[in-house]
Amino acid sequence: LEVCAGERVMQLACADEGTGLEEVVEDWIEHVVDNVAKACSQVRQKVDEDDEVNVNLNGNAKINVEMKSQIKQDQTFVQVDNIPPIPQPISNTNAIGSRPNIQAIQSRSKHIHNKVSTTTNNIITTNPPATTTASTPDIKASTNTNASTNTNASTDTLSLKSTSPSPLFILYGSATGNAEHIAKDLESNYNKLIQTSPNTCYFPSVICCELDQYKKKCTPTWEKPPIDHHLCKHGVIIVASTTGNGDAPENASRFTRYIKRKTTIESQPFQNCAYAVLALGDTNYDQFCATGKMVDRKLHELGGTRAIQLSCADEGTGLEDVVDNWISNIFLHITHACNGHNYYNNDNNNDDDTDDKHNHPQISTTTTSTNPTITNLTIEKEIISSHAEEKKTDENDWEQDDTKSNTLHNHTESPGLQMIKNLLSLSSSHASPTIPIIPDALLPSIGSNLSSCKLVDEELLSHPTSSTKLSPEEMEKMTISSVSSSDLHYHTHQNPYESTILNARYLTQTDTHPATLASNILLENSDLHEPNRIIEASKVMVDNFPLSIQSDKSIEQIQCHKNGKRVIELTLSLPDNLTLEYQPGDSIGIIVSNTNNATSFVLDMLHKNNEVEPKQKIKVDGTHTITVEDAIRNRIDLCSTIKNKRIFLSLSRIATNNEEASALRLLASKTPLGKEIYMEYVEKQRRSVTDILREFPSCQKIDLNGLLGILPEIAPRYYSISSSPLEKSGFAKASLKVAFSVVDYLTPPQSGNDSGTCRRIGGLATSYLEAICSPFLCRSQENKTDLDSSFTIPKIKIFPKPTSHFHLPPNLDTPLVFIGPGTGIAPFMGFLAHRKHLASTADSTRAAKVASEGTWRGGYDIEEEELSIHERDAKGLRIGADFREGQQLGTVDVYFGCRHNDHDWLFKEEMLAFEKQGFISNLNVAFSRDSDKKEYVQDKLKNSPDSVKRLLSTIFDQNGIIYICGDGNAMARDVEGALVEIFAKEKFGGNNISTSEQDATRYVSRLKETNRFVLDIWT
């Protein structure tokens, strides 16, 4: 461009994808428009043509200096332009279906009374003092949990600044929505506190955002020291979940890369911040809370002041016990730390995963100061209750809503109420059908709305303003480049690719007759609309795959068990523009919708009780316009088992029947009895919110805003890719393959259910995929003709989920051990196919030079027509050929497990072919149901002398790598235990068995740290 007489207005910027594009790209984007505008208006001087090309951007340095000098003029408050205004508080209206007023709810409980008084002296402020009000629940929650048993008032004096110079920053990294929900609850709680008692709030406002938005929304403030910076800090709260096996969520990946860079530590970007981290994880996974632990450690290394010890919540056992306690005290801790009164010792080793163990005084504060910018504040809190009084109040004085009726109880009890009473009668700790009264103190906090919606004026949609239209002149200016650039965004969860199903087949020896019947319904029943065809096809599948039978014949019972074990390989198309690429070991996410039955039920319920039409236009959270049906079908999760007990509490506030409301409060409670009933009624029976709405009909008056407010979004389903991008798919389009088990099982018989029947549970994604793929599943492998019918198989929305660790090593000569029972073998099939193609490409260069040899290492014969290049094409690849010739193809030992040799040995033909070709050196298959003695992959590892010998040689002598993929609940732990047992006996043996096991355990940990023991597990 310079040679063609163009004028350079900014120095060339080079962004490195290897270390992260955003560091350069975002600064460049921020300055480029201004610089081009100034150059075009001849204000900016021409950049010297001889300037060196530099990635450091300083084209806007002058403006930055002017802005900084302007900010410094304000001695009392640092105003950052891009900080949004204080969020609007949530309405306190108690419309049906909306979140209730928490303050009003708490005031109804008579067992705890909070007395809060404020006095002010020598206040100098531009704002009038707020009227003294009763304490909000947030202040009550900030007290020590043992305070309820103390009958004496407790006070503590602490000097607090009246207002922080910056907002409270609440950031989250969330994969399934839990971390986002907690963060937004904190934001909502503090905003309510600001609204009701502004004089008690240290922070003037709240900014809540994803961790990856840190640079634009947070960094400009964090970089500047607050007033009296030797004491004051900016407040930062982070809620971080961990996905996969130690990976950061997608919306936190940029932040985690930033804090891990070596160059970041030099600038100490968090030296002006006090922070607290809540880590969410699952102990079923090997790297428990890895992201949260890393963030907490790195922020301290980068100069941050730790306000409270890291807390780790376990989703495997229930988040509430840790999260609720952490939430109740976090505002107190962060306020103390930001004022320089931090009770937590930041020099302590932070390896402990437990919750904070330091006791803090009740927040009851008196301050005096001569600084005119500081408000003198006295907060006195008095706890007036005792355990006996609390119990008496709980039993006799719980207030019920007079508008609720007992009509159902007086005539016919609802199914849910009957079941809860039966379970209470059978409970050893209760043994009575009477539903106990649950006090508010034993219930979770309601929290904030997850989402909200507004109706859209149809007239505005049909008559858009002229500003939204492109003029003919503007349309002519639209070039191919400008159009295509908007389409070349890489596909993510927010921007999925609509993939075409190219093929599907059963990997299990499954009867295809049910698929034939389902296919006939889809392809030939033109009288039904397509959604109804899918419903009928799914019913046919269920009816023709019985999971239980009233027979004593063992053969029939075995067949029923096999019916419940169906595995499908799915071939999906990829975009031609390379915007969705993958490596073997990566996964894809599939975005799914609620079932047609659940969607229809909720739409009918909303229409009947709230006169909401399915085609009505709404905006959810201010985003683009969608229909009510879209929101119900594709946004909120109606079909998953309820994990968040707040949903029961919210529904109890809407229930018009007193007993149903009491039963729902019991399910939401933290009491031992509540947990027992929840486990029996909800968890074991896999009940969803649709089930609860059906079985507790007095909740059905919930409105659309209520549903959007309490239900999380549908989580994507992730599946390991079982193919290699180097494979030739046989289709015109690029493609990939995934393998998945069809979720189809019976729950245990419901306790208290007279009929003794079980509930049949189908997977939301997998059952749907099996039904729509039935035209492919019923075809033989030889008959793969294109489908031609009135039914169009729906496209599947997919996006890539790369892994940072579960990949093949760069060298082909590295020996490998693959352990993958069941569908855990899927990524290893991609690994083996990839190694085959890499080896073939490398060896064909050598083979082209000496084609007459015609042999493949490992004994696999190469035919002349299989060579990918000719000898005359090999000259330019001589260097690569010489390098590859020096490499030996490393050994690969595969351990696979299944139930039956004749039913669920997945990829059997492919495995045997890889073994014959030499790409599998040693194939070990365990069958757990083909004999009286069950055998699993860990048994194959430790009970065979040859396997033990090969394993020890691979790991200790050849620096090989062990990969495990599959179930994390038992298999992965059992295999790791077998490895420790083998290593302890064979390599760390001694007289002291305990010492040898400890040495072996430490050695396995070192293998993990050096990526020589790699796991991809799920629960």
Image (cartoon, rainbow, N blue to C red):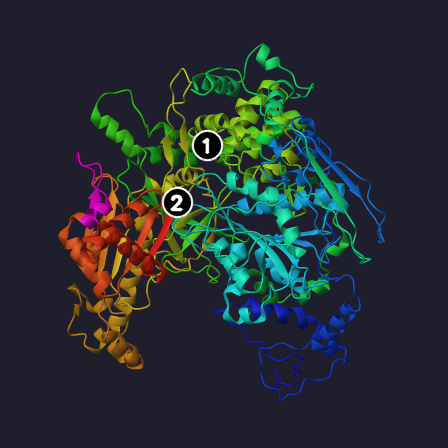
- Residue at 54% x, 14% y is 413
Q: Earlier in the sequence, mark 2 or mark 1?
A: 2
Mark 2: secondary structure:
loop
Left or right of residue 25: residue 982: left
Three-letter residue code for mark 2: Asn
Q: Which residues are magenta?
A: 925-942
For the residue carrying disc 2, how many other residues have a C-alpha within 10 Å: few (<14), some (14-19), or many (20+)? many
Measured as percent of width and height from the top left, residue 715 is found at 50, 44
Q: Nearer the viewer, residue 990 or 814?
A: 990
The disc label shown at residue 535, or none = 1
The residue wearing badge 2 is 284
Measured as percent of width and height from the top left, residue 833 is found at 29, 59
- Residue at 22% x, 54% y is 984
Residue 457: tell me if it is visible.
no
* Quadrant holding the C terminus: top left
Mark 1: secondary structure:
helix
Residue 944: tell me if it is visible.
yes
Q: Nearer the viewer, residue 297 or 797?
A: 297
Q: What is the CA distance from the residue labelled 2 to the residue labelled 1?
A: 35 Å
- Residue at 54% x, 25% y is 666
Contact check, label 2 and label 1, Cβ < 8 Å: no
Q: State the residue lying farthest toward the front.
A: 152
Measured as percent of width and height from the top left, residue 250 is found at 51, 55
* Quadrant holding the N terminus: bottom right
Asked which quadrant contains residue 14, the reply is bottom right
